Image (cartoon, rainbow, N blue to C red):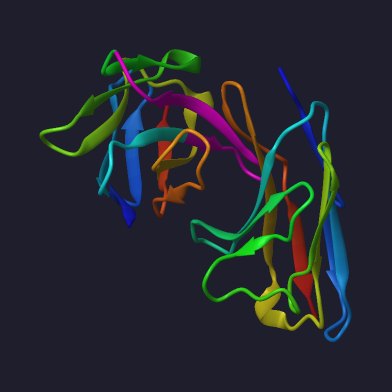
Amino acid sequence: SAVISQKPSRDICQRGTSLTIQCQVDSQVTMMFWYRQQPGQSLTLIATANQGSEATYESGFVIDKFPISRPNLTFSTLTVSNMSPEDSSIYLCSALLNYGYTFGSGTRLTVV
Amino acid sequence: AQSVTQLGSHVSVSEGALVLLRCNYSSSVPPYLFWYVQYPNQGLQLLLKYTTGATLVKGINGFEAEFKKSETSFHLTKPSAHMSDAAEYFCAVSDTNAGKSTFGDGTTLTVKP
């Protein structure tokens, strides 16, 4: 079965700085998704990333705050920009594979 | 528009007892339905999914779910709980097999010895 590698697994960052999260899939996929899971809450979709086009953002999320790259069919990055404590969350990438959606293990971000 | 409601944010069962986690959905088109499990400090793992065809879907770790269109439900069951089943469970719906998913708020399953 396909595997999604996500890194870093966790980080503690200073407010005002930016963090880039990487997601690598071991097979080619058309669509990748980035989710946020705030403490004790469910998953909220940030954006959908297709290779070769700009990401599509959900309501409440903007490109300036969460720029996404999708340079090829196996890789994507999400940057959390100008961080504040409210950005402390788990960020997960996901890809649609033959048998359904597969998720990375998540990045646990704490902003201090 | 789609939505998912998971009834009961916390469910506690004894080891060996039946597990029943409830999920109701709303969708304007025929839904694709999913159950995921999240163990502490880990990502989500797909338990099972319903797309079309047989309404009783079997997944990993002995879990199964039944799609009931008339009740707009997709409840997750397991005949006999094991300690290793303790985790967070999420129900999700999408409008196609390739579309973005909308997640429920999750149900924390506790298994007592």
Q: Horizontal and vertical percent for residue A76?
A: 82, 49
The image quadrant of residue B81 is top left
| Between A98 and B56, the one nearer to me in the picture | A98
Query: Is the residue A42 above or below the residue B33 in the image?
Result: below
Left or right: residue A39 compared with residue B33: right
Left or right: residue A92 compared with residue B12: right
| Between A49 and B86, the one nearer to me in the picture | A49
The image quadrant of residue B57 is top left
The answer to whether any part of residue B42 appears in the image is no
The answer to whether any part of residue B61 appears in the image is yes
Residue projecting furthest to the left: B70
Which portion, as a residue range, is magenta?
B36-53
Query: Is the residue B43 above or below the residue B45 in the image?
Result: below
Q: Horizontal and vertical percent for residue B50?
A: 37, 25
Q: Horizontal and vertical percent for residue B86?
A: 49, 34
Q: Residue at x 35, y 48 (%)?
A: B10
Left or right: residue B5 compared with residue B39: left
Q: Quadrant of the C terminus of chain A?
A: bottom right
Q: Residue at x 87, y 63 (%)?
A: A20
* Magenta stretch encompasses residue B75: no
Q: Residue at x 49, y 16 (%)?
A: B61
Q: Horizontal and vertical percent for residue A26?
A: 83, 27
Query: Is the residue A99 above or below the residue A68 in the image?
Result: above
Q: Quadrant of the N terminus of chain A?
A: top right
Residue projecting furthest to the bottom: A16
Q: Residue at x 34, y 52 (%)?
A: B9
* Magenta stretch encompasses residue B41: yes
Left or right: residue B41 compared with residue B17: right
